[in-house]
Image (cartoon, grey):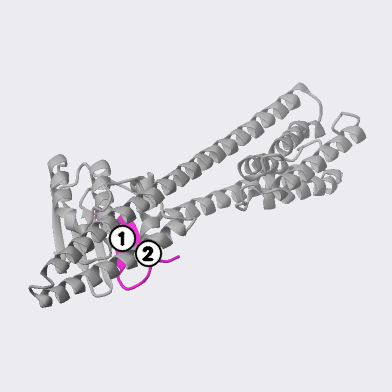
């Protein structure tokens, strides 16, 4: 199961748990209110239960960051709750004779959940006002029952719970913002890496073209046939350079350029042997390379990205699978695809978030997708961890 799937699963579980807890509190409120033989409690139950149900659309779904409707709706609910509390206190003369058995635990829990959601997703300018209003409503709610010291303590406890919910929401918001900034920084670094790759690749091929042109001019008078061969080589090098330059420039023009950690420029699949040699010198698990097909003549952006897939897989194995006994690196070229796999046999329990918690795998995923390919990472069928990537060889880079 991929990381987004796990995240969606956790969100659904949290929503289900919140609904169950809310339902239990609502049942308690209903049972406590209907225990009044006069029927007044049952009649007045409709107001706090209605407010409690009105909080569900606020704290249950996932909202858009910076939402203005969310804090505005929270302000309206908090104001309504404060109005109900004030009305009950005034009508009962402060004795709490109207709602003597419960002040509405479901409503309290719902407003505390609203405070958390507003702090996490609400518009920054409206969050303080909505959170304070909801906190005041939660603090005043026990006054519906009476003004005894014990009820005042309950009000303070509910305020502390609301403050804790706001703190957790703000913490998650800050963590998410920091992660977004880190990803943006990695994207900027990757754009610079693409630019360096483009510069080095073009410089390499242009140098070769110049050398071949000089050689052709030298042998033109002695052996004209060799000039034709040199011109064909110049044509192929120029066409390859222009094609790769168009693809890389297309990526650089994309504002959502793929992020990745800065690595050595222009290291391609033909440099896998030195990479595995260095890995075997520092790791306990030996890495073996299996190549099926000719790796020469690949588009430069595909070759460098595939190299980085192998590097990321080996790095993850070294960091997260110290008990692995072997690592297999398999590269296969077909007429239309380049397939890369890095698999280890580590027995340590691992999950997708644990193996991809850093930005290396995130950036690698975006880089592979920018080239029109796919990448997956997860537990293998026979155990261990498997990183698979597929690059199309006949499809232009997605724009």
The kind of secondary structure element at disc 2 is: helix
Q: Residue furthest top?
A: 149
- Which image quarter is the C terminus in? bottom left
Say few, some or many: other residues with alpha carbon within 10 Å of mark 2 (under 14 / 14 to 19 / 20 or more): some
Tell me if residue 386 can be seen. Answer: no
Rendered location of residue 163, percent (x, y)? 64, 31
Q: Residue at x 24, y 44 (%)?
A: 321
Rendered location of residue 378, percent (x, y)? 32, 55
Q: Which residue is mark 2?
A: 247
Say if mark 2 contacts mark 1, CB within 8 Å.
yes
Quarter of the image where one finds residue 281: top left
Q: Nearer the viewer, residue 225 or 284?
A: 225
As for residue 398 lying within the magenta part, the answer is yes
What is the count of numbered marks?
A: 2
Left or right of residue 237, residue 99 in this image = right
Residue 305 to residue 142: above or below: below
Q: CA distance from mark 2 to mark 1?
A: 8 Å
As for residue 302 lying within the magenta part, the answer is no
Residue 108 to residue 150: above or below: below
Q: Residue at x 49, y 50 (%)?
A: 10
Q: Which residue is mark 1?
A: 301
Residue span colored magenta: 373-399
Left or right of residue 137, residue 177 in this image = left
């Amino acid at each position: 199961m991929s990381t987004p799937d796990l995240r969606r699963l956790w969100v659904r579980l949290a929503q289900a748990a919140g609904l169950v807890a809310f339902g239990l509190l609502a049942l308690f409120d209903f049972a406590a209110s209907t225990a009044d033989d006069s029927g007044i409690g049952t009649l007045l139950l409709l107001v706090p239960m209605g407010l409690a149900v009105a909080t569900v659309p606020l704290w249950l779904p996932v909202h858009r960051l910076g939402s203005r409707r969310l804090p505005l709706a929270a302000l309206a609910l908090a104001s309504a709750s404060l109005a109900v509390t004030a009305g009950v206190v005034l009508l009962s003369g402060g004795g709490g004779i109207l709602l003597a058995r419960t002040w509405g635990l479901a409503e309290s829990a719902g407003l505390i959940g609203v405070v958390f959601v507003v702090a996490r997703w609400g518009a920054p300018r409206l969050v303080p006002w909505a959170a304070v209003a909801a906190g005041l409503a939660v603090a005043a709610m026990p006054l519906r029952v009476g003004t005894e010291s014990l009820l005042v303590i309950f009000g303070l406890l509910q305020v502390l719970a609301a403050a804790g919910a706001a703190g957790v929401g703000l913490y998650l918001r800050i963590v998410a913002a920091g992660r977004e900034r880190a990803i943006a920084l990695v994207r900027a670094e990757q754009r610079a890496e693409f630019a360096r790759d483009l510069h080095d690749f073009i410089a390499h091929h242009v140098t070769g073209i110049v050398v071949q042109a000089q050689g052709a001019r030298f042998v033109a008078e002695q052996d004209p046939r060799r000039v034709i061969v040199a011109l064909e080589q110049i044509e192929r090098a120029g066409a390859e350079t222009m094609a790769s330059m168009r693809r890389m420039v297309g990526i650089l023009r994309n504002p959502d350029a793929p992020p990745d950690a800065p690595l050595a420029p222009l290291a391609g699949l033909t440099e896998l042997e030195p990479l595995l040699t260095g890995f075997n010198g520092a790791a306990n698990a030996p890495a073996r390379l299996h190549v099926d097909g000719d790796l020469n003549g690949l588009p430069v952006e595909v070759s460098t990205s595939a190299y980085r897939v192998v590097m990321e897989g080996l790095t993850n194995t070294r960091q997260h699978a110290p008990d692995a006994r072997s690592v297999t690196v398999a590269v296969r070229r077909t007429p239309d695809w380049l397939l890369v796999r890095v698999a280890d046999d580590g027995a340590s329990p691992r999950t997708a978030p644990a193996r991809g918690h850093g930005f290396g795998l995130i950036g690698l995923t975006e880089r592979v997708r920018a080239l029109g390919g796919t990448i997956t990472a997860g537990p293998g069928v026979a155990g261990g961890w498997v990183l698979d990537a597929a690059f199309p060889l006949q499809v232009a880079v997605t724009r």
